[in-house]
Every structure is written in C-alpha cells, then in structure tokens.
Amino acid sequence: MTKTVQKALIVGAGTAGMSAAITLRRIGVEVDLIDINPNWGALGAGLTITGPTLRALHQLGVYADMVEEAYVGEGIQVCNTQGEPLRKLATPMPADSPTASSGGIMRPTLHRILARHANAEGSAIRLGLTVDALEQDDSGVHVTFSDGSRGRYDIVLGADGVFSKVRGLIMPDAPKAEYTGQSCWRLFLERPASVERRTFFLGGPYKVGFSPVSATHMYMFLLEGTPQVFIEPANFHCELAKRLESYGGLLAEVHDSLSEKDNAAINFRPLEIFSLPAPWYRGRVLLIGDSAHPTTPQLASGAGMAIEDALVLAEELVLDDGVEQAFARFMDRREARCRLVTDSSMELGRLEQARAPVEEQTKVVERALLILSEPI
C-alpha cells in the first residue's frame, strides 16, 4: 500500500474508471467507484481493438478473457467500394509482444469483463450516484455526493466521459465538446467466413468497414460527413440503406437485407470531441480517459488510451513520493501519446471528408500504429 494515497474516489464506472479501480486496488489503494447510471452496463455495438490496446489489456490482466470472449487477429484488409481487395495493412507490434496485433469486442462484453475484475479486486461500487461538490486542501479532497452524503479521499479521478461532471467542477472554463462534422453508424451482424480480419471499404462517399468481435459476429461501421442532424430511430434502416446504395459485395448484401426489424440493432451518433490543454488535473483531482482526451473512432484507440491511463497512474503512484509529483509524471508520459491519437484521428476524419486517396489515408494509420506499438 502507498502511504501517499490510501483511498481514492473514481467517478465514472466505464472503461477508464473500471481499469483504474483494478490497477489501484492492486497497489493497495482503497477504491470507491461510482457511476451516475443506476443500471450499470454498456450500450452500443462494438469496439475495434488495436495491438497496443491488446497489450494494455494484457497488462491489466484481462487479455485471456478477451481471447475467449471476443476476437483477436492480425492486420487490416483494405478493399474498394465493390469489396475487391486492394492491400493488407500490417498492424505491427514488437516481436516479443504477448498479444495479437488486432481485435474487436462488443461494448457490453468488455464492460462485463472489466466489471468482473473490478469486483474481484474488491472495489466498493455505488450506482445512481455522482458528485455535486469537491473541496480540496493540502492533504485530501472532501466530496459531496448527489445523494447528500459526504466522503474524504486522498485523490479523486474523473473518469466520467466527454461530458464529465468532474471536469466542470475543477475546470469550469474548460472547452466544451463540439461536433466534428462526422457521424457514425454501427450495425451488429453475423460474421461470414470471408471476413477474417478488420476490413475497410475505401474510395466511396463514406468510410465503411467490418470489425470482427467474436468467432461468429462482427459490426459494420459507416462514417459520414454531414451537418449535425437528428434521425428518427424508426427510420434508421432506411437511412443506412441509402448510404450503402453504391457499394457492392458484402455491403450490397447488407443493404438488401436491412429492414425495420434492424432498427434496434443500429447505433447512430454524432462524433463530438474537445481538446483539453495540459495539465489534466487540479490539485488532487485528475481527469482520465474521455474526460481528458476524447477521440473520434478512426484510429480505434480511445479505449486503449483509457486503459493505459490507469496502468501509468498506478505505476507513478506506487513510487510514493507525493500526489503532485505522480500526477506531473503521469502527464509527462501520457500527453504526447494521447495527442497522437486525437490528432491522427481528426486528420483521418478530414481526409475522409475530403475523399482523399486511399494511400494518403492508410499512411496516417500506419504511422500512428507504428508509434503506438512502442512501449507506453
């Protein structure tokens, strides 16, 4: 157990929060983990997982669960709009990496895995709860919860996402999330044998792809540049079908099969991000994951950055030389790496909207994944 940090509050029990609960419990910190959602769980379709994220999951101790319950593989298949193969992109990892270099998982599956481990490590989890006030002094943080109760902690972690309540409390002038100009469609599907790995269909009006999430299933994604609009969920199948009209191969089969019954399986959301200047902490309150560095999905690294945040924070806290020193070292190790992900993802978004050549887009992916394959 560290002497500097003996008790921590984590606000937000998603990927970042649960990962931090696991890593902090393993260094002996008492953890209270809260989430505003009384029905704890995850919605949405799937997540693409890169090699560096698989490595982070291995360090977290959950890679075996990933192999058993999700998908792991190698490389990315790039096709044209008719499904004809153009090239395979390597997804490089060091030769001694203990993991595969690519993967995919359903969001609810990842939530179940992390929740199982967070519970096993002994985190105290409270649901339907958030924070209303934070009052700091030299030795800790007084917290007022939304149910009127109070607590005192050595540190507080804001892991409550893009619209973080904690960020608003400690950084009232922080930038607000803004629409990027792109929206993302996702659809959960059975996985045919021909989809052996992540597959992109480039060169058309949209970036479309398949991402395996298990031995039997995958999800399709479609990124489009458009003014921010509301689409009635009852019309999801019609609107998605319109966007697939010019595509062939397996995408044509998806187009032909869409019907009203698929609306519940279709997820549509605008992509919203902000860029938060460093440092991502004030005193003893630190932001991690999407609360500090949200990203668009182009580089498939948002979850990985959140898990890495948790790993790095525990490594710095266990040195036991003070919260300020640990948080400062955390920023030294995390800021540039997270900026690489957010900046590369936004660059890809701009190239997609401009319908830039396939080679120009794939170069951005290859360059970023090569850097991310380096040690954290």
Image (spheres, grey):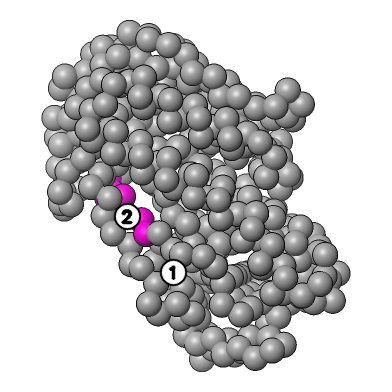
Query: Quarter of the image holding residue 177?
Result: bottom left
Task: Find residue 286 and report its horizontal and vertical position in percent.
Answer: 58, 70
Residue highlighted by disc 1: 164
Task: Find residue 248 and report its horizontal and vertical position in percent.
Answer: 23, 13
Mark 1 residue type: Ser
Image height of 78 relative to 351, above or below: above
Residue at image coords 63%, 50%: 308
The C terminus is located in which quarter?
A: top right
Mark 2 residue type: Glu
Residue highlighted by disc 2: 272
Residue at image coords 63%, 34%: 373
Residue 269 belongs to the span the image colors magenta: yes
Task: Find residue 51 and report its horizontal and vertical position in percent.
Answer: 60, 32
State whether residue 213 appears in this view. Answer: no
Image height of 250 relative to 319, above or below: above
Query: Quarter of the image holding residue 13?
Result: bottom right
Residue at image coords 82%, 70%: 320
Query: Quarter of the image holding residue 334?
Result: bottom right
Residue 262 belongs to the span the image colors magenta: no
